[in-house]
Amino acid sequence: MVEPSSSASLWRTVLPICCICLLYLTSFFLFVCSTNSLIYSTVCYLRANASFCAEIDRNQSYHLLEESIQKESSQWALYGTLSFSIIACFISPIYGSLSDTKNRKLPIVLTICNAIVTGLIITIASIHQGTQLCLILYLIANIVNGFGGGALILISSCFGYATDSCIQKEQHVQIIALIEASLNIGVVIGYVLCTFFFQLQLQIWYILLIHVTLLVLTLFISLVFLRTRLTTESSTISTRRNLFVHSLIHVIYSLL
């Protein structure tokens, strides 16, 4: 049985988790926006040249070719999603079991480390934008990302880590509300930054470099401020909430 924590100790536990969730979701949506743009531009460059791709959205006579490029881009995005999802289907139960039976910190750290490696591979792919190698590296990055379980594992482990620190129902409600708020703020900041960066017409590799930097900061917080604690069978509430988070994130992924 986990002993009740003081208010100060509870805040010391929750604040790092909220920062991790906020930074991870911000970097995640930067990743989504930049990779979608990378795929589309690469497919377009393989079909034509840079000047043609710059005018394709403005010239109505290119409408059919634009639809063809969008269709091929969607196919590559689908291949990437499948590459990630198939592997994550087998890895996620392992990480989830590790989080519920051993400790919460390890899956969080492993997922962030995996996301950093994935981000670096995509950044290298963006340097080869407009080539077939870029698309191949994109698929490899999604395969690597699948071994980390993705946001699904990190968020559920964060919920479990925070809720294990208290046993009072009121504290559970407050903690869950704070983490959900940090997730929502991270999503908003991610979309705003993505829009802002594209308005500035920054290179995709630069946006991806910011994505990796945010993940490195997230990893630093998780290593320094999260304590390694063993979980017990008394964390039934956390496990149930983790299952709820799994279902919720699956819905979010289906809407992206």
Image (spheres, rainbow, N blue to C red):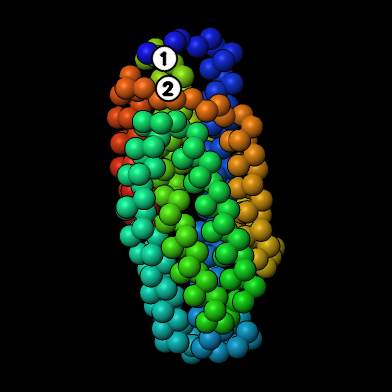
100 sits to left or right of 24: left
- Please give the name of the residue rendered at 57% of the width and 15% of the height, measured from the top-left corner: 9
Quadrant (top left, top right, bottom left, bottom right) of the N terminus: top left
Mark 1, secondary structure of its residue? loop
Q: CA distance from mark 1 to mark 2?
A: 7 Å
Residue named by callout 2: 164
Report the disc number at residue 2: 1
Crowding at mark 1 (Cα within 10 Å: few <14, some 14-19, many 20+): few
Mark 2 residue type: Asp
Residue at position x 36%, y 58% from top?
Answer: 87
Residue drawn at 41 percent across, 83 percent down: 68
Residue drawn at point x = 39 percent, y = 78 percent: 71
Q: Residue 176: in sight, yes or no?
A: no
Residue 241 in the image: above or below residue 64: above
Residues 238 and 38: in front is: 238
> Whole-percent x and y of residue 62?
49, 88
